[in-house]
C-alpha cells in the first residue's frame, strides 16, 4: 500500500437495461486527488524524492504542468510528502480546480491557452529560475513517464487480487474499458496485464470523445499524430498527442478504439449521477458509456457477450465538473442546430517520432 494513493474497490455494477454481461467498476474516483492520476504521479514523485533525499546534497522540488487533474494529483502527493510544488495550468482550467490545487499549499501559475503552452512555459521560464545549487527539480509530465505507468499498473494487481478473493477466474474477463487521453492510464493497464501474462488474452477497449480522438486517428493513420486543436468538452482527455509507447502497445496487443460524441457522454454522465448519486466528469463518462451501450462494446470486441462474461470498466475519476456544469453543457448541445462535423485535417505528423510500427 502506497502512502500517496489508495487501494480502490472493484465492485459489481448493474447498469439499466438487459445487459448480457457482468460489469465491474474500478472506483478510481476514491483516490486522494479524486482520480487515477494519484497512482502514477504519486509514484513518480515519491520515487524521485526518495532518491534525491538519500543523496542528501539537494532538496527535491516538484514542477508539474497540467490541465487540471494531473496537477491536482501532484499537489496532493506533495502535500502528503511535505514537498514544495509548483503547478502551471492553462487559462482553460476551471477556477474551481485552480483553487483545489492551491488549497494543498502548492503554488499555481496560470499561463497559456492549453496544456502544451503551459508545459512550455513551465520548462522554458519557471524551471530556468531554479537555484540548482540547492534544489533538485522533479519535472512531472501528466502522462508520459515510465514511473507514472508503473504506478498506474498497480490497479491491475488490485483487480487480480479482488477477483481471486471473490473466486472469479480471470478467464471470465472479456475486456477492460478505459478512457484514453495521452495514454498514461492505458500504458499502466497494459504493463499490469503483462505481469500476469494476460496482455494478449484480455483486450482493452480505449474510449475517446470526438474532437480529442488522437489515439483513434493515430491507429487509423498507422503512426502517432498530433492534433492542431482540441474541440471536445472532455478536457481531461484533451491532449494533442499520445505517447509513443501507447501506440506501440496498441499495435502489439490489437487494442480496440471507440470514439463517441460529446453530447452522448454528457447524457451518460448525468444518467450515472442521477442513478448512482456520484458526479463524474466527461473523461470518466466516456468509459461508463459502454456500460450503458453494450452494443458498442460488443462491436468493439467483435463478439457477443454471454451472461457469465465479465467486463471491467475503469471509473478513472476526476475533479473538474459539477452537476450544474454537466446540465449547462447538455443544454448547450441541445440548442445546437446541427451536429458537430469532424475536422478531417486536424492533425499533423510530428517531426520526430521514436514509435516502432508493429503488426497487430
Image (cartoon, rainbow, N blue to C red):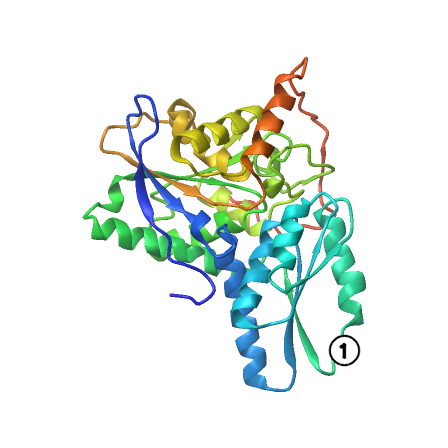
Residue 326 image position (x, y, % from top left): 57, 31
When asked about the image quadrant of residue 290, the answer is top left
Residue 75 image position (x, y, % from top left): 59, 61
Residue 330 image position (x, y, % from top left): 59, 24
121 lies above or below 24: below
35 lies above or below 289: below
Q: Which residue does the numbered mark 1 point to in the structure image?
A: 131
Q: Is residue 199 left or right of residue 64?
A: left
Residue 304 image position (x, y, % from top left): 31, 25
Q: Is residue 138 visible?
A: yes
Q: Is residue 142 visible?
A: no
What residue is at 33 percent from the left and 43 percent from the top? 201
Instruction: Give the quarter of the figure containing the N terminus.
Output: bottom left
In the picture as drawn, the residue positioned furthest to the top comes out as: 337
What secondary structure is found at the residue carrying circle 1? loop
Q: Is residue 265 left or right of residue 328?
A: left
277 lies above or below 296: below
What residue is at 67 percent from the left and 17 percent from the top? 336
What residue is at 58 percent from the left and 33 percent from the top? 324
In front of the other: 249 or 130: 130
What residue is at 53 percent from the left and 46 percent from the top? 318
Q: Is residue 157 left or right of residue 213?
A: left
Mark 1 surroundings within 10 Å by alpha-carbon count, few (fewer than 14), some (14 through 19), many (20 or more): few
The number of callouts visible is 1
In front of the other: 134 or 218: 134
Q: Is residue 212 left or right of residue 275?
A: right
In front of the other: 144 or 345: 144
When asked about the image quadrant of residue 123, the answer is bottom right
Amino acid at each position: 500500500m502506497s502512502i500517496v494513493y489508495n487501494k480502490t474497490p472493484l465492485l459489481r455494477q448493474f447498469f439499466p437495461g438487459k445487459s448480457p454481461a457482468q460489469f465491474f467498476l474500478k472506483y478510481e474516483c476514491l483516490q486522494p486527488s479524486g482520480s487515477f492520476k494519484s497512482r502514477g504521479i504519486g509514484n513518480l514523485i515519491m520515487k524521485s524524492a526518495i532518491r534525491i533525499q538519500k543523496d542528501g546534497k539537494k532538496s527535491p522540488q516538484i514542477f508539474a504542468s497540467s490541465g487540471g487533474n494531473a496537477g491536482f494529483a501532484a499537489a496532493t502527493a506533495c502535500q502528503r510528502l511535505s514537498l514544495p510544488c509548483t503547478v502551471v495550468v492553462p487559462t482553460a482550467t476551471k477556477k474551481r480546480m485552480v483553487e483545489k490545487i492551491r488549497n494543498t499549499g502548492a503554488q499555481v501559475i496560470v499561463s497559456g491557452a492549453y496544456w502544451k503552452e503551459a508545459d512550455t512555459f513551465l520548462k522554458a521560464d519557471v524551471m530556468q529560475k531554479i537555484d540548482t545549487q540547492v534544489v533538485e527539480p522533479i519535472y512531472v509530465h501528466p502522462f508520459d513517464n515510465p514511473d507514472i505507468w508503473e504506478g498506474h499498473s498497480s490497479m491491475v494487481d488490485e483487480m487480480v487480487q479482488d477477483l481471486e478473493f471473490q473466486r472469479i477466474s480471470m478467464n471470465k474477463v472479456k475486456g477492460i474499458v478505459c478512457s484514453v487521453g495521452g495514454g498514461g492510464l492505458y500504458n499502466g493497464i497494459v504493463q499490469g496485464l503483462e505481469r500476469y501474462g494476460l496482455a494478449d488474452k484480455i483486450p482493452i477497449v480505449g474510449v475517446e470523445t470526438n474532437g480529442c480522438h488522437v489515439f483513434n486517428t493515430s491507429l487509423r493513420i498507422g503512426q502517432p499524430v498530433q492534433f492542431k486543436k482540441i474541440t471536445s468538452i472532455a478536457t481531461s482527455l484533451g491532449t494533442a498527442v499520445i505517447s509513443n509507447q501507447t501506440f506501440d502497445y496498441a499495435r502489439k496487443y490489437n487494442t480496440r478504439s471507440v470514439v463517441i460524441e460529446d453530447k452522448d457522454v454528457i447524457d451518460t454522465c448525468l444518467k450515472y449521477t442521477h442513478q448512482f448519486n456520484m458526479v463524474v466528469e466527461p473523461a470518466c463518462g466516456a468509459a461508463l458509456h459502454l456500460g450503458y451501450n453494450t452494443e458498442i462494446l460488443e462491436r468493439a470486441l467483435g463478439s457477443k457477450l454471454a451472461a457469465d462474461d465479465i467486463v471491467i470498466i475503469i471509473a478513472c475519476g476526476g475533479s473538474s465538473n459539477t452537476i450544474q456544469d454537466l446540465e449547462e453543457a447538455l443544454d448547450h448541445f441541445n440548442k445546437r442546430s446541427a451536429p458537430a462535423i469532424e475536422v478531417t485535417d486536424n492533425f499533423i505528423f510530428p517531426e520526430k517520432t521514436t514509435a516502432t510500427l508493429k503488426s497487430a
